[in-house]
Image (tube, rainbow, N blue to C red):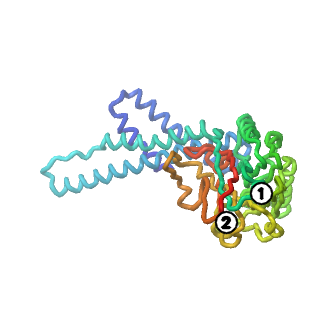
Amino acid sequence: MGALDAYAFQALRSWLSKYSPSTRRTAYVIYWALSVLSFAFIVLNVLEVTEAWSDGLKVYSRAVVFILYLSKVPVAFFLLIDDLRRGVTWIINRISPVTKRDTSRSRFLSKTALVAGGVPLVTLTYGMVRNAYRYRRFSVDVPVANLPAGLEGFRIVQISDMHSGSWTRTEPLKEAVRMINEEEGDIVVFTGDIVNNRADEMEPYIDIFKEVRGKHGVYSILGNHDYGDYVPWNDDREKENNMQRVYAIHERLGWDLLRDEHRKLKINGSTLGLLGIENWSAIMRFPKYGDLSVAAAGTEDCDCKVLLSHDPTSWDALIRPEYPDIDLTLSGHTHGFQFGIEIPGFRWSPSQYIYEQWAGLYRKGTQSLYVNRGLGFLGYPGRVGILPEVTVLTLKGVRG
């Protein structure tokens, strides 16, 4: 970190070379003060002094340090190009000393380096300040083969990945609940990760989210973060107690938690099978707790089947090969990496290099998958290009 600080500083010093001494001194003091504070924060974090800080202070302090050092990486990259240029020039000068050549630091490349560093600095700061709670409504028609008339136009409102341990504000969450209820969905579903790690993270927000309403109920499943697998516990009993509290939170919210289970909903003379499984991932570092065979048993007579499965990798690895009668799978998990570009005709996110299905609607054969971008955030407390989402999915019949 110190080396990166010192290297990136060369670009700042070169760019400021034509400014007054007082301007340069002020800029230098600000630059190094931020670096010292960042280093001090990391030391305090290692010493666990920050454990006594408020969640909001910890979350945003970590984010600021992350943004500052990430922004210095492209600066260092362009300075490296400049130093390579200077090195080549020096070698040529040694071979041919008659020719006069300039080996000074290129002011142009220093400016380019600062601009390159400014892009992540500005965008990530904006994404943190402006976009973390900037909820976006997505509306999607889902084609279902041979959908009975009684389920035509059935509306599902989906939310996912709340990660309540990352939230620091409550007022925007009330707006999210208002958006959800305004849709008057036939059902509302939540597809996992209600907490980051511990059940008590959700406590401040229960009164807000217990207002979520669906005509035929609110249904939920667990995500990989809900099991408490990513924090050290004193013993198995403490972890199990936390798990029981997570179950109790869904009950207090009035959400019907599906743990390898299904519900049959009688709608206008037709039967919708709503299935929900525990986390099941095709990626090794995420758990395979779910048993879809248990959840699906007894749903053979359903006119349409909708599955809640937190991790979208389950679709290609398990659902499509073994359960072709599941019409629609609803997932979350990816967050769209909370970073990317989504404009008409073009989508990109680093998420696509890990997940084939990372955001939005996908269809193969007669089966569909929708991947929700998440309502909350994890790690970086913001979003750039990939906004938090409330989804409205409408079932539309097509000939099989």
* Residue 221's disc number: 1
* Residue 314's disc number: 2
Q: Residue at x 72, y 49 (%)?
A: 153
Q: In this rendering, does residue 116 appear at all?
A: yes
- Nearer-the-camera pick, 85 or 90: 85
Amino acid at circle 1: Ile
Which of the two discs, 2 and 1, labels the residue nearer the N terminus?
1
**Residue 250 image offset from top left, x and y in percent:** 83, 51
Q: Is residue 307 above or below residue 61?
A: below
Looking at the rendering, which quadrant does residue 113 occupy? top left
Direction from residue 91 to residue 275 in the image, left or right: right
- Nearer-the-camera pick, 63 or 139: 139
Q: Residue at x 28, y 54 (%)?
A: 87
- Nearer-the-camera pick, 332 or 320: 320
Q: In this rendering, does residue 231 appear at all?
A: no
Amino acid at circle 2: Ser
Image quarter of the C terminus: bottom right
Direction from residue 57 to residue 358 in the image, left or right: left
Q: How many marks?
A: 2
**Residue 275 image offset from top left, x and y in percent:** 78, 61
- Tell me the SS state at disc 2: helix
Q: Going by the picture, which residue comes out furthest to the left?
A: 98
